[in-house]
Image (tube, rainbow, N blue to C red):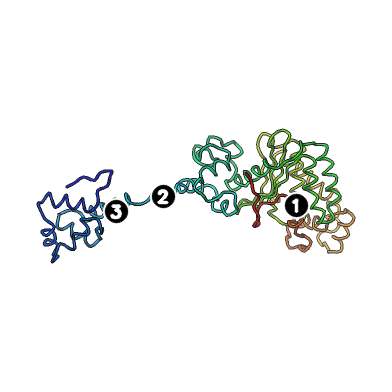
Amino acid sequence: MPQLTNTAPSPGEFLTALMDKRGWSQTDLAYVLGLKTPAGINPILNGKRGISPDMAKALAVAFNLPAEEFARVQAKWELSQARDPDPGVTARAQVQSEYPLREMTKRGWIRESDDLEKQLCHFFGVNSLTEIPHLSHAAKKTESEKEMPAAQLAWLYRVRQIATEMPTPPYSADKLHQAVDQMKLMLGDPEEIRHVPRLLHDAGVRFVVVEGLPGSKIDGVCLWLNKASPVIGMSLRFDRIDNFWFVLRHECAHVLYGHGQDAAIVDAELEQQTENLSQEETVANTDAAEFCIPQAKMTSFYLRKNPFFSERDVLAFAKIMKVHPGLVVGQLQRLLGRYDLLRKHLVSIRNHVAKSALVDGWGDVIPVG
């Protein structure tokens, strides 16, 4: 019986070798198979037709071989004739195993093209697929990246990618302090949010809004491109005024304290972080809460009115504090665990942000090099 080689003989060649070994002609084989003429064998021998499952069983009996042998010859030949797959299959399979690559492509972060591997390496800033964090043997994975879910890490890389191309003056801590003071005066009117990107830019802080990937539960990030280039990224996971100001001030605190210079600080599910917090997160939370509403005043209002908080009382307190009622409602909801309380005051802010900020997501893609 002929041996299969790496070149994969055609079914016709395999069958011809079996016939030669027995000294059979085409007519002889046709006779053995119960065919009236060799016409039923010729198309197989000349490569115009393959060996069907029925024919494989018949040939198996004729040559006293397993039918699977003929099926294997046919399958191996067909594979040898098939076109090579898209080289991007390997890259997609490797990355999709960890990252939401399909969603990243849909967002325009990665383009579907022949150079997919090159694009992925460029996106993650590595030289090969094996160096991408979370893939096996990733040489560049840092300690913080080991602990970070892949969807959050992909979002972080997108923020960094966009921020890298933003022309921004060198960072000034004094100007950022001044910007925070100015932002404090904006808490009463959602429209004022449009000024935030300019204030941060003038202080040398790159401000980027990137829609979070599904399931990432990410709120914001503080990272540094270098010692003079801090970046604040936000996802607007909750499109409401209280969350926007809390997350923004939280990330501003990280920048002002110099946090995140060695490794990016990614903040996820900030609303649930209450225990076992690092010192960095504790001080950032404290500054953010105090910024939104002085906590001594908030505590006093809560104790005086608990457990009944009328809309009139909330509006009056917000007016005294010179903040939007949504900031008061947001803190009350969290203190009471009642997320249905006066929800109409948790107004949307995304359109106000989009007026002046770089926003990537919700149908828009920021072009990067």
Q: Which residue is the site of mark 1?
A: 244
Q: Residue furthest bottom?
A: 36
How far is disc 1 from disc 3 in space, using C-alphas? Answer: 59 Å
Q: Nearer the viewer, mark 3 or mark 2?
A: 2
The residue at the point 26 percent across, 52 percent down is 72
Which image quarter holds the C terminus?
top right
- Three-letter amino acid code at the position of disc 1: Phe
- Three-letter amino acid code at the position of disc 2: Pro
Q: Point out residue 357 in the picture as x, y percentages from the top left corner.
A: 74, 50
Residue 345's place in the image compared with 10, above or below, is below
Relative side of 225 to 43, left or right: right
Q: Which residue is the site of mark 2?
A: 85
Within-10-Å neighbours for mark 1: few <14, some 14–19, many 20+: many
Per the rendering, the mark at residue 98 is none
How far is disc 3 from disc 2 in space, using C-alphas? Answer: 17 Å
Within-10-Å neighbours for mark 3: few <14, some 14–19, many 20+: some
Q: Is mark 1 on a helix, strand or loop?
A: helix
Do the residues under discs 1 and 3 have CB atoms within 8 angstroms? Answer: no
- Three-letter amino acid code at the position of disc 3: Ala
Within-10-Å neighbours for mark 2: few <14, some 14–19, many 20+: few
Q: Point out residue 162 in the picture as x, y percentages from the top left corner.
A: 66, 45
Question: Of residues 142 and 124, which is closer to you in this image?
Answer: 124
Q: Point out residue 297 in the picture as x, y percentages from the top left corner.
A: 86, 50
Residue 336 in view, yes or no: no
The residue at the point 77 percent across, 64 percent down is 344
How far is disc 1 from disc 2 in space, using C-alphas? Answer: 46 Å
Q: Which of marks 1 and 3 is in front?
A: 3
Q: Which residue is the site of mark 3?
A: 75
Q: Which of marks 1 and 3 is nearer the N terminus?
A: 3
Residue 323's place in the image compared with 134, above or below, is below
